[in-house]
Structure formats: C-alpha cells, structure tokens
C-alpha cells in the first residue's frame, strides 16, 4: 500500500516544483483542501438558501461535547482492549462524528414534530450540548487536546485523513448530483415538492446527516470556531453574483476552491494558521463579490 502512495506523492512533488509542495504534511493538507473546501462550499449553497447557518453552528459546537465523550471513553476502551494503543487518537474523532450526526438528526426530528420556530429548536440543542460537555469535563476532570478541535490544524493530517476526506467527498458529490434539483425545489416550496412525490422529510434527514459529517471533518481543518464560515462565506459570495441556482453552486465551488488553495499556500509562507487564512481569503472573495454586484446594475444601465 505504501509503495503506490509513495509513488503518487513523488509524482505530486514533480508536478508541483515549489517549496511549499515538498513537505509531506503540505501535500496531505493540499489533497484534503482540494476536495474539502469545494464540498463545504457546495453544501453551503443549501445552508445559505435555507438559512441554516445557525444549524451548522450548532453541529460544530456539538463537536466539543463529542470530543469530550471520546476522551471520557478512553480509559474504558484501554482497559477493555489493552492490545490496542492510542485510544486517545481513535475515540475522540469517532465520537465527534457520531455525536454530530446524532445532534443533526435530533434537531431535524424535533423541527418536524413541533410548531416551534427552527431557530428556537436549534437554540435548545445548541445550549444543551454545550452544557453537557462542560458538565462532563467538570465532573470527570478530563484532560485532552481540546485546542486542536477548537482551532483546527490541517498540517498535522496524515494519509488516512486524506483517504477519509476523499471518501466523504465522493459520497457528498454523489448525493448532490442525484438530488440537487430536488433540494432546490424543497428549499423554494416544500409543499410543491411534496405534491410532486418528493420525500421531503427523507431528503431533510439525509442532508442533515451529510452536513453534520462535513462539519465534523472540517473541524480538523479550521476548528469548530470557524467551520461555519467555511460553509457560509463562499456560498454567500456566490449568491451575490450568481444569476441562477446552478450558477450559485458553481460560483460557490470556485470561491471555496480558490480560497482553500490560496489560503493554504499563503499560510505556509506567512506562518499563519491554515484554517484562519483560508477563511480570510474567502472573506476577501465575499467583499469582491459585493463590489461586483454593486457595479453590475450601473454597468447594465
């Protein structure tokens, strides 16, 4: 397995004869950003159109509690399976993803079963999961690498992270390719979509689960404090200048990819956190799109 991968990385270095592309950690980061930034932006189209930014924020902050639960289970797993080492590296990312999906499903379920406004339901979950995490930490006096999840650190990602990210990207892109038009119709008029035989509830659950997975995996790149921006900012920039839903999708992907790759390279030379630099570049794209949308009507006139 290592032979083909080593040959692939050697080929990448040959194709990219730049200083920033020579270290192995930068190649791993490049391969992750290459797919993670565009799929975040693509998922962000529905997030922006459906006003789900608060939803993704709740999922990202639930990561804190997911990580806490992972560290809580480490001693139990170590006693039960002493032959397996580094449970502190295995369990927190796993419980992070599982808990994030569970919170997303819970929010969706309650939203469908009550007449409460969506932001109220999300607010209840948001507060509850944060309180649970704080209570567990205080009760058990847990110690762990929580800063890694707060701020993100893509440069410490390994090859297994690359494989997982590309696998997730394949699932997300397949889902969007098969359901993009249905998702847009649901966003515009859920009643009309339901009358045309579209299983709106099933699509809602599926999108929420995938969004939760994308958010939890993105936390390793930009941290839970910034992950919502990775979804929202490129899509918001695309909405400023797009003339159609399809155009918004492709503009969002372009902004996400451009800010992701450029931000990663700049962070290498400027010695700044990659996640924060990527978000700042996305913000620059947003400002540029605002200026372009302001100039367009005058140009047309």
Image (cartoon, grey):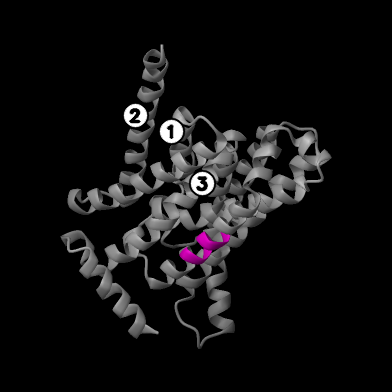
Near-viewer residue (133 or 188) = 188
Residue 265 horizontal/vertical position (percent)? 25, 52
Say which quadrant the N terminus sits in: bottom left
The residue that mark 2 highlights is 288
Report which quarter residue 149 is drawn in: bottom left
Query: Residue at 40% across / 55% down in the picture?
Result: 221
Q: Give the range drawn in magenta.
A: 166-171
Crowd rating for badge 3 (residues with CA inside 10 Å; few <14, some 14–19, many 20+) = many
Residue 272 horizontal/vertical position (percent)? 24, 48
Query: Element type at marker 1?
Result: helix
Crowd rating for badge 1 (residues with CA inside 10 Å; few <14, some 14–19, many 20+) = many
- The answer to which of marks 2 and 1 sits earlier in the sequence is 1
User: Magenta stretch: residue 168 in it?
Assistant: yes
Crowd rating for badge 2 (residues with CA inside 10 Å; few <14, some 14–19, many 20+) = some
- The answer to which of marks 3 and 2 sits earlier in the sequence is 3
- The answer to which of marks 1 and 3 sits earlier in the sequence is 3
User: Magenta stretch: residue 297 in it?
Assistant: no
The residue that mark 1 highlights is 237
For residue 263, side relative to residue 110 (left or right): left
The residue that mark 3 highlights is 42
Query: Residue at 57% across / 70% down in the picture?
Result: 73
For residue 38, side relative to residue 201 (left or right): left
Return the residue found at the far bottom: 83
Main SS of the magenta part reads helix
CB-based contact (under 8 Å), mark 2 and mark 1: yes
The answer to whether residue 45 of the structure is visible from this angle is: yes
Whole-angstrom CA distance, mark 2 to mark 1, is 8 Å
Near-viewer residue (220 or 287) = 287
Whole-angstrom CA distance, mark 3 to mark 2, is 19 Å
Say which quadrant the C terminus sits in: top left
Numbered circle sitting on residue 15: none
């Amino acid at each position: 397995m290592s032979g083909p991968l080593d040959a692939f990385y050697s080929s990448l270095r040959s194709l990219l004869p730049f200083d920033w592309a020579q270290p192995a950690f930068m190649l791993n980061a490049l391969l992750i950003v290459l797919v993670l930034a565009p799929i975040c932006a693509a998922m962000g189209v529905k997030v922006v159109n459906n006003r789900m930014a608060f939803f993704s924020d709740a999922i990202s902050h639930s990561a804190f509690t997911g990580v806490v639960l992972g560290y809580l289970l480490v001693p139990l797993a170590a006693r039960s399976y002493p032959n397996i080492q580094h449970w502190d590296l295995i369990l927190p990312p796993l419980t992070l993803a599982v808990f994030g999906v569970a919170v997303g499903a819970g929010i969706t379920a309650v939203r469908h079963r009550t007449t409460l406004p969506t932001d109220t339901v999300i607010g209840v979950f948001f507060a509850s999961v944060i309180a649970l995490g704080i209570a567990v930490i205080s009760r058990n006096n847990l110690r762990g690498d929580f800063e890694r999840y707060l701020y993100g650190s893509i440069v410490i990602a390994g090859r297994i992270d690359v494989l997982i990210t590309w696998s997730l990207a394949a699932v997300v892109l397949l889902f969007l390719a098969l359901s993009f038009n249905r998702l847009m119709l649901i966003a515009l008029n859920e009643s009309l979509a339901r009358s045309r035989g579209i299983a709106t509830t099933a699509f809602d659950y599926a999108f929420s689960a995938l969004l939760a997975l994308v958010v939890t995996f993105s936390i390793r790149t930009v941290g839970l404090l910034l992950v919502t921006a990775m979804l929202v900012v490129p899509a918001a920039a695309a909405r400023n200048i797009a003339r159609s839903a399809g155009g918004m999708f492709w503009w969002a992907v372009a902004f996400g990819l451009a800010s992701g790759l450029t931000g990663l390279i700049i962070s290498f030379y400027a010695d700044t956190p990659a996640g924060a630099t990527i978000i700042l570049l996305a913000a620059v794209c947003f400002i540029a799109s605002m200026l372009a949308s302001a100039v367009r009507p005058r140009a047309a006139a």
